[in-house]
Image: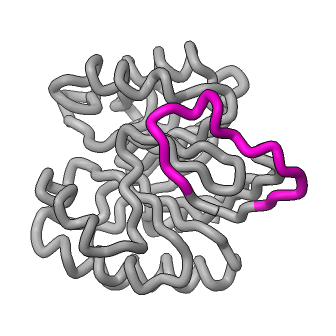
Amino acid sequence: MVSQTEDNRFSRSKTKGQRLRVYAVADIHGKQSRFERVRENLLRLKADLLAVAGDITNYTKPGIMLSRLNTLPVPVLVIRGNSDLKRVDGLFSDFPNCMPAHAVCTMVNAIPFVGISGTLPIPFRSRISLNENRGLKRIEPLVDMHTVLITHTPPYGYRDRVMGRFHAGSKRLLELIEQCQPQLVLSGHIHEDGGMSMIGKTHVVNCALSRKSAGAFLRFEDGILTGLEMI
């Protein structure tokens, strides 16, 4: 069951035996070949939900990729990345299978998913947006130890290394994670640093699509992450 709320403190289901299989990707960039790769993996893994951590499109013709995602047999949780223009927000309502996760809590089988859209590259580092502090402060009340946080940019120092040399993640996002300790963070943006890391008890996954990586497969039981593998 999928539902959305602006506060997850009282909305977690107590029902036992709920399982969820999630396929997580980022950085499709409007490419048909990447979408086909996602679709094939989604079906092969028998996932119940697709989470897309930004850069769905490549600046132009966003309706084409949203239409493709809308045809998938499972719900699609989406946020915008830096190559998804602001006007993409206004298109989501035309594609009911694509659920925008920005600044809301979406409950799926007792798991609260919270998203924050956008990323702003600056030399050797990224920010969520020009108003990064305001945006992260807005979602902070929605994030707790049960949350799956979806954000395009990785936290600074974790799966964010550009060309194997420079950390390019968000420092303010790192602070939020250290403070709230969500159970899982899904990101992308830095294509060459896909993989998994830990920040305290938080699993950090860069699920960017690349020649070497096809995202991540997650298994949950009763709202708790029980399995995580890179594809």
User: Along the horizontal axis of the image, is 97 left or right of 85?
Assistant: right
Q: In front here: 15 or 117?
A: 15
Q: Where is residue 144 in the image (x, y as percent from the top left)?
A: 61, 26
Question: Where residue 114 sits: x, y (%)?
Answer: 49, 41
Magenta part mainly helix, strand or loop?
loop
- Left or right of 96? Residue 217 is right
Residue 98 placement, left or right of 124: right
Q: Residue at x 35, y 24 (%)?
A: 138
Q: Which quadrant would the C terminus be assigned to in this image?
A: bottom right
Q: Which residue lies furthest to the right in this view?
A: 17
Picture residue at 20% right of the left edge, 35% below the top: 120
On whether residue 13 falls in the magenta region, the answer is yes
Where 159 falls versus 65 (above or below)?
A: above
Look at the image and tell me in which quarter the N terminus lies. bottom right
- Residue 162 seen in render: no
Q: Nearer the viewer, residue 43 or 207?
A: 43
Q: Measured along the vertical axis of the image, is residue 78 above or below residue 204?
A: below
**Residue 212, placed above or below residue 164:** below
Counting the numbered discs, the total is: 0
Residue visible at 60% across and 65% down in the picture = 23
Residue 49, picture quadrant: bottom right
- Residue 106 in magenta stretch: no
Q: Where is residue 95 drawn, in percent x and y? A: 31, 74
Tell me the quarter of the picture where residue 24 sits: bottom right
Q: What stretch is highlighted in magenta?
A: 3-19
In depth, the one of 163 and 35 nearer the eye is: 35
Colour scheme employed for the rendering of this structure: one colour
Name the residue located 34 percent from the left edge and 54 percent from the top edge: 54
| Visible residue check, residue 200 | yes
Give percent across and percent down for residue 133. Answer: 29, 17
